[in-house]
Image (cartoon, rainbow, N blue to C red):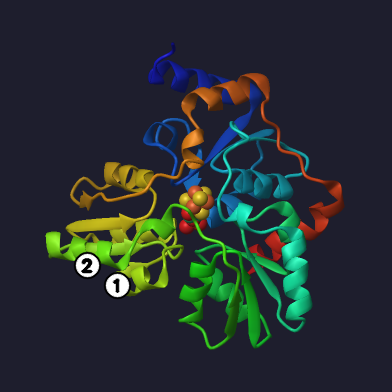
């Protein structure tokens, strides 16, 4: 069994040999985030950075929809996902056929698809969004009502910030839906000086009780600019681990929930991906152009 350090060294050597980069989401474990990633960030940053990569190979240390987005933006490059089962409960909650039915029901409403969706769903949508730009994307559209899918809670949280009517789907993130308003109240009782940051995939009643809601990158900026003495991040566990390493003066209180999909990615399978080219992400050419347009429209905003 190779140690962490041996795997890190092997990955660094493989990246040089194969002219590869590792793009890692903020929920990756610290040994990936700090040890082998070239670029780390939220979904929006990973999509933006994917358009600038000049390496031959991209290893996406994150979940499958993130790798698909990177491939959509880099059709000529090899994009690898170290575990094909690294999915997402939101992406699994809706199909392209569901989107067509929503359109038929609300023909005047443009469709905003969260990036946490399959390529087929993106292809049926008008524009994508992430938690980092959802409000901007919704406000950029001329229509009075907008379909936002598949995350019901993100849609409800955005609906509170816009005058547009938001039509939601019933998908949920299996990690963020577990946080409750009672959790928030208990946290305040236990730690009266705590600042509570929530991801907008949390239920609206949780966001309402939090001090701030934003994407994983926005949470990080909040911590690094405001420097609260004690903070809790209502999101996936690795997020606090990764930021805590860079902010030793901030006390991180940690009730958190693990994303089993994000945790499928390990140093071992990143190394294996670079050694064996498994698993290469491919996109159905029949839907690639339409899906890419949805992502590119978002990036243009
Ligand atoms: P961010 O875009 O905020 O990083 O969120 C991605 C995600 O999967 C949250 O659960
Ligand atoms: Fe999907 Fe939730 Fe995991 Fe993010 S945390 S990848 S939204 S299941």
As drawn, 130 above or below 137 = above
The residue at 64%/56% (across/down) is: 117
Of the numbered discs 1 and 2, the one sitting upstream in the chain is 2
Residue highlighted by disc 1? 209
Give the SS element for disc 2.
Answer: helix
Could you tell whether 228 is left or right of 161 in the image?
Answer: left
Q: Position of residue 206 (x, y in %)?
A: 34, 68
Could you tell whether 205 is left or right of 293 in the image?
Answer: left
Name the front one of labels 1 and 2. Answer: 2
Q: Position of residue 122 (x, y in %)?
A: 71, 59
Q: Residues within 10 Å of mark 1 (few under 14, many from 20)?
A: some
Give the SS element for disc 1.
Answer: helix
User: Marks 1/2: CA distance?
Assistant: 8 Å
Residue highlighted by disc 2? 185
Quadrant in the picture for the C terminus: bottom right
Could you tell whether 225 is left or right of 283 in the image?
Answer: left
Q: Please say if the residues under marks 1 and 2 sit with CB atoms less than 8 Å apart.
A: yes
Q: Position of residue 14 (x, y in %)?
A: 58, 21
The image quadrant that residue 216 belongs to is bottom left
Q: Position of residue 254 (x, y in %)?
A: 25, 49
Q: Residues within 10 Å of mark 2 (few under 14, many from 20)?
A: some
Residue nearest the viewer, comparing 197 with 39: 197
Q: Is residue 191 visible?
A: no
As drawn, 136 above or below 145 = above
The residue at 48%/68% (across/down) is: 153
Could you tell whether 254 is left or right of 144 in the image?
Answer: left
Q: Is residue 266 visible?
A: yes
Is the CB of mark 1 within 8 Å of ligand 1? Answer: no
Residue nearest the viewer, comparing 15 with 114: 114
């Amino acid at each position: 069994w190779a140690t962490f350090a041996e795997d890190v060294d092997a990955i660094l050597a493989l990246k040089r040999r194969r002219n590869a980069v590792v793009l890692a989401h903020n929920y990756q474990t610290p040994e990936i985030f700090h040890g082998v990633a070239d670029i780390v960030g939220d979904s929006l940053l990973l999509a933006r950075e994917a358009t600038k990569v000049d390496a031959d190979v991209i290893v996406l240390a994150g979940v499958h929809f993130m790798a698909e987005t990177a491939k959509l933006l880099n059709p000529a490059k090899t994009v690898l996902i170290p575990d094909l089962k690294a999915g997402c409960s939101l992406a699994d909650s809706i199909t392209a056929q569901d989107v067509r039915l929503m359109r038929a029901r609300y023909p005047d409403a443009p469709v905003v698809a969260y990036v946490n969706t399959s390529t087929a769903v993106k292809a049926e949508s008008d524009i994508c969004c992430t938690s980092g730009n959802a409000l901007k994307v919704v406000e950029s559209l001329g229509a009075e009502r907008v379909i936002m899918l598949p995350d019901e809670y993100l849609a409800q949280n955005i609906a509170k910030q816009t005058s547009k009517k938001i039509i939601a789907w019933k998908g949920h993130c299996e990690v963020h839906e577990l946080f409750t308003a009672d959790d928030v109240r208990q946290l305040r009782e236990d730690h009266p000086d705590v600042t509570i940051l929530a991801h907008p995939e949390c239920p609206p009643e949780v966001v309402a009780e939090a001090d701030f809601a934003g994407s994983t990158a926005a949470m990080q900026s909040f911590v690094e600019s405001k420097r609260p003495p004690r903070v809790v991040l209502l999101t996936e566990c690795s997020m606090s681990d990764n930021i805590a390493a860079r902010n030793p003066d901030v006390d991180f209180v940690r009730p958190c929930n693990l994303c089993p999909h994000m945790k499928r990615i390990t140093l071992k399978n990143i190394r294996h991906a670079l050694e064996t080219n498994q698993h290469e992400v491919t996109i159905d050419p029949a839907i690639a152009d339409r899906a890419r347009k949805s992502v590119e429209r978002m990036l243009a905003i």
